[in-house]
Each structure stands twice: as structure tokens, then as C-alpha cells.
Amino acid sequence: MTPTSESFFCPGEHKRPKLEIEIRKCGIEEWKLFSKFHYLNNSLHRAAQCYVGFINDNPVCYAGILHFPHPNVRNFKQVSRVVVLPDYQGLGIGHKFITKIGQAYKDSGNRFILTSSAKGILTAMIKSNDWIVTRKGQVAKGNGSFKDSTSYKKITCSFEYIGRK
């Protein structure tokens, strides 16, 4: 995926600034800046393909993408981590950022999925025409190691990016 710029305006009650975000592929080491702001935990799989979004050359958001093993589909990619720094939250940056990355993965022949329990991202994805809900509800009651995870008993939704045809 090549670096790209995306200019967007977030509609809402108040006038929001027009922001231009540049997406750059990065290494796993950039995760350190964002890890403490992730709502579940600060771990990141070492195989993640990583991206940082910049506004005026300042890093504002981060995504880690993993291959998703599936018994019938070979080309699933899944958002492992997405973080928007606190000063930039609520502006629609996370949704626009992950949607742009989803389009690039779709353009390269992959299916792109996201599962989250974060209210802001869930609200944005549900309202979007670029994403479809593939699963919603509470995660399994859990047993074994899952029972001790930070996702245990959280309401989650899964989405697949469908984007432009």
C-alpha cells in the first residue's frame, strides 16, 4: 500500500475543521506512542502490518492489521488495533483512517474486517455505507484463557468493509 492523503470534513452539530490526513506504512516500533491509549490493552502482534495517520506531520492515529486465518477464505485481513490520540478523538478521524486502509486492502484483492466494542467506532461503522455489520452482540461467555481477557463479557460488533465497487 502506498502513502496517501485524504481530506475530509466531519458533519455534526458544530463546525469542525477540515483535516487532511496522510497515511504512511510504518514499523511496529511506532506502536509505543499509541499503545497506552488503546482501550483494551497495549499489546500488538509482531506480524501486524502497521500504519500511522498524520495531520500536519503530527502522528494522530495508528492501525495494526493482521492476516485472519479462516478455514474457507484465504484473503481475510483484520484490524487488530486502531487508536486515535485523545486530542483528536471525536472528529471522525478513526473511521476515515480505517476506511481508507480498508479500501486499499480491498483494491489489492483482500476482504477487510474489524471487530470492536469501542462505542465511537461502532457508531461510525453502523452509520457508514462502506461497512456492513457481520455480527453483533455479546461475546461468548468464555472459558479457559478467554475468560481472563479484557474482551470477556463486552458487547462487540464485527464489520466487513465493502466500500466502492
Image: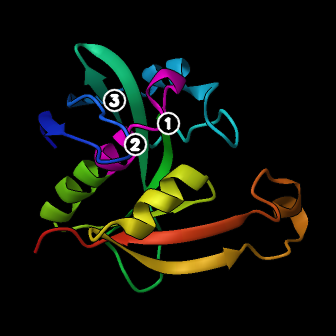
Q: Give the range drawn in magenta.
A: 84-98
- What amino acid type is highlighted by mark number 3? Val
Question: For residue 148, which quarter of the picture?
Answer: bottom right
Q: Which of marks 3 and 2 is in front?
A: 2
Marks 2 and 1 in Cβ contact (< 8 Å):
yes
Residue at 66% across, 40% down: 39
- Residue at (12, 36) in percent of width and height: 4
In the image, residue 164 above or below residue 59: below
Say which amino acid is labelled 1.
Val
In primary-sequence order, the first of circles 2 and 1 is 1
x, y percent for residue 60: 39, 24
Viewer-closest of 88 and 157:
88
Residue identified by numbered label 2:
94
* Residue wearing tag 3: 52
Quarter of the image containing the N terminus?
top left
Neighbor class of circle 1 (other Cα within 10 Å; few <14, some 14-19, many 20+) is many
- Looking at the picture, which amino acid does disc 2 mark? Gly
Q: Is 123 left or right of 146, judged from the image as shown?
A: left
Mark 3–mark 1 CB contact (< 8 Å): no
Q: What element carries label 3?
A: strand
Disc number placed over residue 83 in the picture, else none: 1
Percent coordinates x, y for residue 55 in the rendering = 26, 21
Q: Say above or below: 46 vs 75.
A: above
Residue furthest out toward the bottom: 72
